[in-house]
Amino acid sequence: METSDDMEQRAKMLRAETETLLQSPDFIRSPVMSQLLRYLVEEAISNPNNPPKAYQVAVDGLGRTDDFDVQTDSYPRVQVGRLRKMLAAYYAARGTAERLRIPIGHYAVELQTGGITAEGKTGSATPIDDGLFLSLPAEKGLKRWLSHRPATYGLAALVFLGAVGLLWFLNSDRQDIFSTANASDYILPPKIYIERPQRAQMGPDKEKTNELELFFEDAFASSSQVRLAVADRPGGAFEETDGENAYLFKSELVAGQTGPRVKFSLTSLMQDENIWSSIVTLPDSPDDYPEKLGPLAGRIASIYGVISTDQRKHLPDDAMIGYACLLRFENYRSHREPDLLSVVESCIEKSLAADPLDSRILAAASFMAYLREEATGRKPDPKAGFQFARRAMVLGREDASANFALARSSFFNGNCARGKEFAEKAVELAPYEATVQAQTGAYLFGCNDPDATKYLRRAIALDPRGSIVAETALVLSLLEEGKNREALEFAEKIVPSSTGVGPYYDIAMAAVYASNSRNEESQTSWDRLVELYGKENDESAEQLLNRLIINPDLADRVFVLLSQTGVISDEQARK
């Protein structure tokens, strides 16, 4: 039986470990998970033998209304499951002896120290494997690891050494860099609040409202562009905070001629203005929400969505660290403007100095390491790209960008099967992010994988106006299949003013016009591409395409097509 001193010591240890967790990047980016963790820890301290039930977690921990129905709504179970995964990923990266854990099937938080929990239960000092942990290869085994799964004890030993080396990196002199960097300049993604109806609706409307809210909470929680926030007071009502870098998302059921409709709106709290609204037909079943409402969620909170576009519009010139750097990085990744290269490289370096544990910045650094010599003036560094991707994965196992960083490493090393595995995990983690779908489809296209078209079409469905990478690859994919006419009909529907067009529109149009014997129009598109994105020096057409298209197979296919049709002259090809 615990004495009062034991209970006091246990409470101190629980709160100390909680505060450490809440200072980590993943929890800072997730106010909902932070609030839930605080609630469960305080319950573990005040009621150690009486853990909260699902209803208490929903109402007291997550701010649901008093009429919450645990029989029809799995919200608390889903959110606690997400918290359990975040804890597992955090400790997998650090290997600390003391750790918080939430046993499967319970809402009780336990403090594990070594092999024994603070509650006196025997536990494993190794984190429970929920499928969250990455097998780390030794550096010399890069190509073999990318091609095959570890299968021997000898390789397992190398895996262990790799993990030890990473932990040394995370806890050594890089922490001195962190302490000297100006971490106060580190910008986090804006918050998004979901306003719940202040007056409980009756009957089916109430159930539909809850289903809509749960869908968008899950959708926004999967976005890298926002931090899902909780209502400011219990019961779900929202109190505005003047000048906060945040957005308020509202939904309201309204009557329609053929059935119920939903009116959505998004308000910028910083600008105190409505920046987006839409009215759509309410899908018949929640099972239809991902297909019917997923594009709307992506329109709001994707990399080129309403919120990130608004953030770019108001981004200060000197904002360079954290989320601000990611905004600049995505601009460069899409447009490949040479003037942005040094800015992005500098802001990534500054961001890693301020927070070397940010998996999204590490993923961006991995991308930059793979850029071709035509873009940077230096040779690609696959070794550095892989190391950045591996660190990103260890620190952000549930981060789509980290998973895709490892997918990219595999694709670049010619392992399409391994690349597809990580890319599909990224798609699962960010189901409404058109860019992830588009990149997955583009790389699979380069691998001649028949699933490429599925992802490319999904990217276009999620963002018909902004998936230029997907549209380009889909046009070329149709051309590869000999569907020249279909490719042309699709290409002519592309809106050239789309967000993030960059050079891809002209590349697609030059190729599709050439394939349909419309060489004059193909030549116009090619000349415009050279004028806007070509360098003043003697850069050949092949070098230009390799600089603009990071997928080498895709770049080669476009070059061959345009050369064979005469759009690229012999002189341009020989430069």
Image: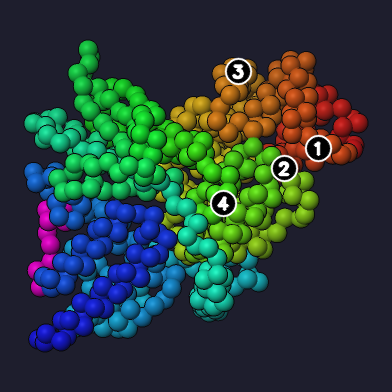
Residue that label 1 marks: 535
Q: State if disc 1 and disc 3 touch (CB < 8 Å).
A: no
Distance, label 3 to label 1, CA atoms, is 28 Å
In this view, the mark in front (2 or 4): 4
Residue that label 3 marks: 492
Disc 1 marks a residue whose amino acid type is: Lys
Distance, label 3 to label 2, CA atoms, is 28 Å
Disc 3 marks a residue whose amino acid type is: Glu
Q: Is residue 404 left or right of residue 240?
A: right
Q: State if disc 1 and disc 2 touch (CB < 8 Å).
A: yes
Residue that label 4 marks: 320
Residue at 25% of width from left, 52% of height from top? 78
Instruction: Tell me which corner region of the image, top left, top right, bottom left or bottom right, holds residue 298.
Output: top left
Q: State if disc 4 and disc 2 touch (CB < 8 Å).
A: no
Q: Compare marks 2 and 4 and give the one earlier in the sequence.
A: 4
Using the rendered image of the protein, determine whether residue 318 is visible from the camera's viewpoint: yes
Viewer-nearest residue: 375 or 190: 190
Q: Compare marks 2 and 1 and give the one earlier in the sequence.
A: 2
Give the x, y percent position of residue 152: 53, 75
Q: Compare marks 4 and 1 and give the one earlier in the sequence.
A: 4
Q: Which residues are magenta?
A: 49-58
Give the x, y percent position of residue 243: 37, 42
Viewer-nearest residue: 135 or 111: 111
Instruction: Tell me which corner region of the image, top left, top right, bottom left or bottom right, holds residue 89.
Output: bottom left
Q: Is residue 205 left or right of residue 518?
A: left
Q: Compare marks 3 and 4 and give the one earlier in the sequence.
A: 4
In this view, the mark in front (3 or 2): 2
- At mark 2, the secondary structure is helix
Residue that label 2 marks: 338
Give the x, y percent position of residue 70: 12, 48
Neighbourhood count class around disc 2 (C-alpha, 10 Å): few under 14, some 14–19, many 20 upward: few
